Image: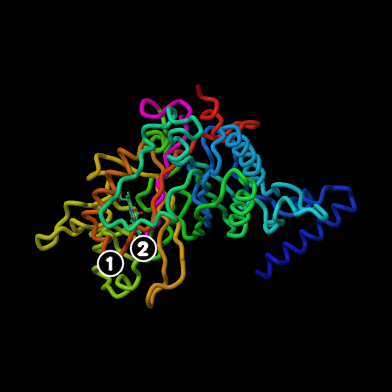
Amino acid sequence: MGSTRRKFLSAAGAASIGAALGVPADAALDAEHAPAEVPFHGTHQAGIATPTQKYMQFLALDLVNDSVDDLAAMLRRLTTAAALLARGKPVGSMRTGDAPPVDTGESAGLGAARTTITFGFGPGVFADNRFGLERHRPAPLVDLPHFDGDAIEPSISGGDLAVQVCADDPQVAFHAAHDLIRQATPMAVPRWLLAGFGRTSNSRSQTTPRNLLGFKDGTANIKVEDQGAMNQFVWARPPESPSWMHGGSYLVARRIKLLLGPWDDSGLNLQEQTIGRDKLSGAPLGSKHEHDPIKFDARSHGALVIPEGAHIRVTSPNLNDGAQLLRRGYSYVDGVDGRAPASGLLFLCYQRDPRKQFIPIQRRVSTDDSLNAFVQPIASAIYACPPGARPGGFVGEALLTAS
Ligand code: HEM
């Protein structure tokens, strides 16, 4: 904290030197840090094939008027702001005299921190008699069905517009969500917002972090460097997706509460049999190392070493017609649940077609997974994330100009 404060103070010092030299104050603040920037513009939106950052703010907004022109204007504002935030820049002036600062200021001097901002459209954008976009609804953007065990709370589910903000600094991530809400006003109002930490890994450059059950999470995930898997399982394309979605992806978000009371009171063997891996090393049961192949047929004294209901068996591509997901989830904490922390996983997964990936896998999970004794899905959402914006364009432009 001391060093962050020192950096902020020296950034403030740099700002006044900058002012004396006639350099705009905001630029002087930025120059203090060599920002780790992830390019905002490109074929795909950043924040999907980006190695997961340390922190997340996931924001869902509802659109409150039905004008397609106002929708386009808001998307343009959000795109401009997001491109600035990805470079560690303020979204507008912070020196406004009697007027409220345009940028709220809490990330000044903190740099870009690998910020990515990923937008997605919920099914409501394509509703009848709303924006006139109903015929452009992509077939893979289905309404998610009810799954066994779901206890979905509507107020923290769904939303017309998703904004996934990820960054390596929690305050930078918060600031982006905060200022994007202001930029979306008055066209949109926030519906739900959740802060996350403790990412699921998705890159060969990362060691696998642990989730709040204490298990490594991300071992058998698609790795973003694996272009073949990204093309096969993540990027939207024909024939099932319309051309405005090519290079985009479909995001399913599920807030899954962890029942830490019963979990913490379970023996280690039961915990490991529930997941199917060794808790400390992350190795599949019956193997030694984290990345050893999973031996699904191995038996000991006649019993399967990796039990029928083990999470890694139920979710394995072997049992799911080869389907895979790019998982990009984050842990969250939200008060107290009995004698345990109320916490969970915001399970986020990107895919080419949820009808062939998340939905069938989750159907199997909801009935067969031993993990169900320790988790409870409480919120659910699906979004179509369009391809990336070109410089000068805006996210979703191809949808709004599609004929
Ligand atoms: C709170 C809920 C969940 C927890 C704590 C959790 C935890 C884990 C852990 C520890 C692993 C093993 C390490 C790894 O390969 O990443 C894993 C694997 C996996 N999980 Fe989950 N998971 C949860 C929910 C889900 C859901 C809802 C799905 C999909 C519907 C899912 C899909 C997968 C897949 C596809 C794998 C990799 C399977 C393989 O190929 O080996 N998980 N999960």
Mark 2 Cβ and ligand 1 under 8 Å apart? yes
Going by the numbered disc 2, the residue's amino acid type is Phe
- Image marks 1 and 2: residues in contact by CB distance under 8 Å: yes
Give the image location of residue 69, x and y in percent: 60, 32
Q: Is residue 97 magenta?
A: no
Asked where in the image residue 238 lies, by quadrant, the reply is: top left
Q: Earlier in the sequence, mark 1 or mark 2?
A: 2
Residue placed farthest to the left in the image?
A: 302
Q: Residues within 10 Å of mark 2 (few under 14, many from 20)?
A: some
Q: Residue furthest top?
A: 403
Residue 1 position (above or below residue 392): below
Residue 271 image label: 1
Name the quadrant of the N terminus: bottom right
Q: How is the image coloured?
A: rainbow
Tell me, yes or no, whether the highlighted magenta stretch contains residue 240.
yes
Query: Is 249 in front, or is 267?
Result: 249
The x, y position of residue 288, in whole percent, is 29, 59
Query: What label does residue 215 carry, if any?
Result: 2
Q: Amino acid at mark 1?
A: Gln
Query: Whole-Å distance between the Cαs marked 1 and 2?
Result: 9 Å
Image coordinates for residue 247, horizontal then vertical, percent: 47, 32
Q: Which mark is residue 206?
A: none
User: Which secondary structure, mark 1?
Assistant: helix
Q: Is residue 349 visible?
A: no
- Range shown magenta: 238-257
**Residue visible at 79% across and 53% down?**
99
Image position of 206 (left or right of 98) = left
Give residue 356's quadrant in the image: top left
The one of 5 and 188 positioned closer to us in this rendering? 188
Q: How far across and down, in percent of the image, does residue 119 sit?
A: 52, 42
Of residues 226 and 370, which is closer to you in this image? 370
